[in-house]
Image: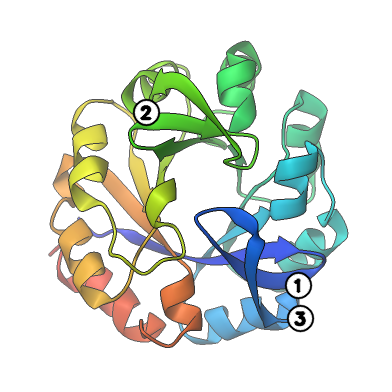
Amino acid sequence: MSITIYPAIDLKDGKVVRLLEGDMARATIFNDDPVAQANVFHEAGADHLHVVDLDGAFQGQSVNGEIVAEIVESFPGKVQVGGGIRTRDAIDRWLARGVDRVVIGTAALTDPELVREAARALPHRIVVAVDARDGMVATHGWAEVSDMTAVDLANRFADVGVAAALFTDVGRDGLLKGCNVRATSELARNTRLPVIASGGVKGLVDIADLARHASEGIEGVICGRAVYDGKLDLRKALRLAHDEAI
């Protein structure tokens, strides 16, 4: 089994940025042209993208929507989009614009029935974002921490047609500390949903470690700052994600 590499494009004020631990005040700009960045990833061999409207995540509605739409139109592969998607209308609008999968975070905690209904009507098109700080689910752009565990949130949606759980260790995101493989594989073993890892990937060792756990239910991994900083060669990561799992 191979895992899927999802290069990340996080959008703030129309630009490609990376945050440290989800803090909007600690943003580094990496590209003024998000569409060009998507094309760079495609040329490196990526056929999946993970796009986040960071402004939308904090405001609860699409802010960088037109730019996301341009990325979707330009990128030949599959794009999953998250950030401020908290209504059925928002879900339907993104899917109508060619998005492959919609990532829902805050609404999965605050309005679980929305997610269940959407997943039943749109099987394998909804991804639930399980963002955790010290094992507890973080919401509203990671600005708030709930009293629900990551496992409990994922299992809320294990039988309604959700495509995957996107698990982010918020405390590692953007810090290049290494992916929390232990927590990711533990979540994968304790839910029937495929799990996408995110947060802290620092190099090829993380890709290899995650790929070796693919049989436990790890479907893929989001790669962000390590790619932008040049610490992770995307072409090599894509090959390794396939080779390690064979």
Q: Is residue 119 visible?
A: no
Residue linked to disc 1:
15
Residue 101 coordinates in the image, percent (x, y): 59, 44
What type is the residue that disc 3 sits on? Asp
Q: Nearer the viewer, residue 237 or 175?
A: 175
Residue linked to disc 2:
150
Residue 81 coordinates in the image, percent (x, y): 64, 50
Residue 226 coordinates in the image, percent (x, y): 41, 76
**Label 1 crowd (10 A; few <14 / some 14-19 / many >=20):** some
Q: Secondary structure at mark 3?
A: loop
Q: Nearer the viewer, residue 124 or 235?
A: 235
Identify the image quadrant of the C terminus. bottom left
Residue 202 sits above or below residue 118 on the image? below
Gap in Å between the C-alphas at discs 2 and 3? 34 Å
Residue linked to disc 3:
33
Label of residue 158 in the image: none
Q: Nearer the viewer, mark 2 or mark 3?
A: 2
What type is the residue that disc 2 sits on? Ala
